[in-house]
Amino acid sequence: MASIKEVIHCRVCNSTNLHVFLDLGKMPTPNGFLEKKELSRKEELYPLVVANCRDCSLTQLKYIVNPEIMFRNYLYIPSVSQTRLNNFKQLAEDAMKRVKLSSDALIVDVGSNDGSLLTVFKNLGYEVIGVDPAENLVVVAELNGIPTKQGYFTEEMAERIKRSKRTASVMFATNVFAHVSNIKEFLLGIHTLLNKEGIFISQFPYIIDLLKENQFDTIYHEHLSYFSIHSLLRLAKETDLDIFDIEHSPLDGGSVKVYWKKKENTKLPVKTKQIQSFLAEEKRLGLFTDKPYNEFAKRVKKLRISTRQRMDELRKKGKSIVGYGAAAKGNVMLNYFGLGTKVFDYIVDSTPYKQGKYTPGTHIPIFAETKILETKPDYVLIMAWNFKDEIIKKNHKYSATGGKYIVCIPEITIL
Ligand code: DWN
Ligand code: ZN
């Protein structure tokens, strides 16, 4: 595949009726952190343009970057965020309430990263297998005791796991759906590997929250799709899988947990009322019209102006500002707003692999979190706003010395 490809047909319904509503400009991929020696090299920039399908309401990127560029060596890990680990524990407990696991049950996590979710099951004595394309993270996961297949999850990969082991009782894909281009083939793989009574749980940020809360920074090259329940149900119809339940959760600014089973499994009841209420809300908000997307784009453009102004004012007053959390979303915010080393002295992040590196496009140095108390900046802009509570709690000593926090989602606010 070339390094970039234009999307002409909707990934779910094949329509060409795609309405481009926001162009965030050209920028590097959001996890393309740089070594010091790479700073003088020209970075590859890719368009970040998003569209909604007027026929099935799937929001999707208009240009997709070759996944090998983004995922073969991946610096993001979930285990440095306690909120995420808590979510994994809850997901595991939830799955075990819904499926009675026999002692020889196999649990599979697709996009298993460093193996954090599967560790919960492994510690309970179940056999687990992870699947992830990142070569560096497969090594980390294996060191953590989680057997992991390197690669993308396809029907062929599903067949291979089934042949070498057996079918799975529970399968997960947390924050993975959005990353997959051929989502139909992905679901066929789930169908192949899942056993008759098994369940598959997918969890991802919900388009309604994204639009309502101005979460434009969740839009980036790694996220090809921003699913509505309408679009997902349409997809499900083309597979032999049923969505039998959907739950909303506050994770990542608003996510949905979607529960799938094989159609042939009639033991698990389909929660029709619950699913219908999501569909009704999407209709009410006009997800099949251009309006909510155009209004979102207007607010995002305004947010860019107001944030830049606010940062400018603070800098003119001689205030020092640093960033907290070199998240992928943070890099989208920095690049789209055009905020770099003139505004931020540095960024801190708990991920060891990001420390010592520089942010893509904006070249801000990244340090360990302890740097905050060493330099006591006037303001800390929390770029990982989804972990705002965890970050503020953890840094109570900084607040005690008079330090202030800023967030810019949904609005630029000094806390
Ligand atoms: O879907 C994706 C999500 C799940 O993870 C991926 N495409 C990429 C990645 O997105 P992100 O980088 O925006 O994810 P997070 O989990 O919101 O990133 C938070 C960042 O903040 C991490 O780099 C860790 C850092 N952090 C920190 O430094 N101190 C987080 C916490 C909670 C902290 O206390
Ligand atoms: Zn469509």
Image (cartoon, rainbow, N blue to C red):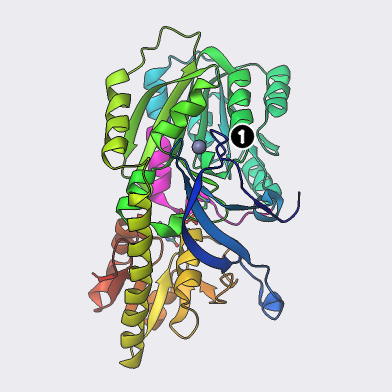
**57 or 133: nearer the eye?**
57
Badge 1: residue crowd in 10 Å (few <14, some 14–19, many ≥20): many
Q: Is mark 1 within 8 Å of ligand 1?
A: no
Residue 212 lies within the magenta run: no
**263 or 91: nearer the eye?**
263
**160 relative to 204 in the view: left or right:** right
Q: Quadrant of the C terminus?
A: bottom left
Q: Across the whole image, how many numbered discs are drawn on residues?
A: 1
The residue sitting at 34% across, 45% down in the picture is 208
The amino acid type of the residue labelled 1 equals Gly
Q: Which residues are magenta?
A: 73-90
**307 or 137: nearer the eye?**
307
Which residue occupies the extreme front position in the image? 17
The residue sitting at 58% across, 67% down in the picture is 27
**26 relative to 89 in the view: left or right:** right
Q: Secondary structure at mark 1?
A: strand
The residue sitting at 37% across, 42% down in the picture is 255
> Can you give x and y, in whole percent of width and height, for residue 187 in the image?
58, 27
> Can you give x and y, in whole percent of width and height, for residue 406 in the image?
30, 71
**97 relative to 236 in the view: left or right:** left
Res 133 quadrant in image: top right
Residue 366, visible in the rendered structure: yes
In the image, residue 80 above or below residue 117? below
User: Which residue position holds label 1?
Assistant: 130
